[in-house]
Image: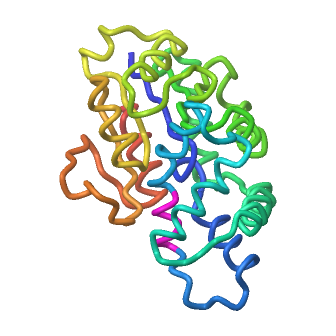
Amino acid sequence: MLTIAFDLDDTLYSLEAPYLRMLALCFPDADDLPGRALFCRQLDRFEDCFKRVQAGQASKENLFADRQVLAFQDFGIPLSHQKSLEVQATYRACQREISLSDEVRGMLDRLVAAREAGRVRFGILSNGQTSNQWRKLKILGLESWVPAHQIVVSEEVGYAKPDPRIFQVALDRLGATPADVAAGDCWYVGDSVKNDVAGASNAGWRCLWVDHGYGLPGSDQIHPDLRVTDEHQMTEAVLGLLG
């Protein structure tokens, strides 16, 4: 049976929008801040900071703040610890305003109908801290479409994308089997080159890559099964998998 797992951040909703809003609030006089480039760099810094948390070398409560310090440093911009905490608090406030678009809601409605007809299984597989990811999941109301036991968050299970083991956890939660993977019936929908496309490929899944045009390292060397460049194309491609 067709099995689909979705990434959360910057796949089912825009992660960039609240980040850029945060920058505007925290740095109102800094017109020359490289907003999109900073957004991309701090995403790329997540894995380094998460490993430090796992090793007990950093606080998970300040994971976002710590990676902002590193991202800003990469552009030669000093960011104090105190300012990074302000950035973190402001960003979390901006994230409380996130929402699903009507198009994504419509896609999820149709997937639920297909699930009830026995045509598809689908869930969510997301990297991140348990408390942060579940806060966003609840703000977005995603449990209206996806049962909680079919939502996998990396901190909860102890593995993070691109580790193939987290894809196996998702497979088990969704009730799929290695035979479904071998048949090419398991799809992952996500935006990250390293975590989503490479992770899905390493796990034997097929991948629908949501390419936001960030130009992150490795983007020109990957070969997803499907590539889309915006939300409309994503929803159309997902619904196209239903046949």
Please tell me in which quadrant of the rendered image residue 94 appears. Answer: bottom right
Residue 136 horizontal/vertical position (percent): 72, 44
Is the magenta region chiefly helix, strand or loop? helix
In front: 188, or 68? Answer: 68
- Quadrant assignment for the C terminus: top left
Please tell me in which quadrant of the rendered image residue 203 appears. Answer: top left
Q: Which residue does the image show at 75% across and 40% down from the upper left?
A: 141
In front: 3, or 9? Answer: 9
Q: Which residue does the image show at 44% across and 40% down from the upper left?
A: 239
Instruction: Please tell me whether residue 41 belongs to the stretch shown in magenta.
Output: yes
Magenta segment boundaries in residue numbering = 36-42
Instruction: Please tell me whether residue 148 belongs to the stretch shown in magenta.
Output: no
Instruction: State whether residue 35 is above or below residue 200.
Output: below
In the image, taking residue 9 as reference, residue 40 lies left or right, namely: left
Residue 202 horizontal/vertical position (percent): 27, 28
- Quadrant assignment for the N terminus: top left
Q: Which residue does the image show at 35% across and 42% down from the upper left?
A: 208
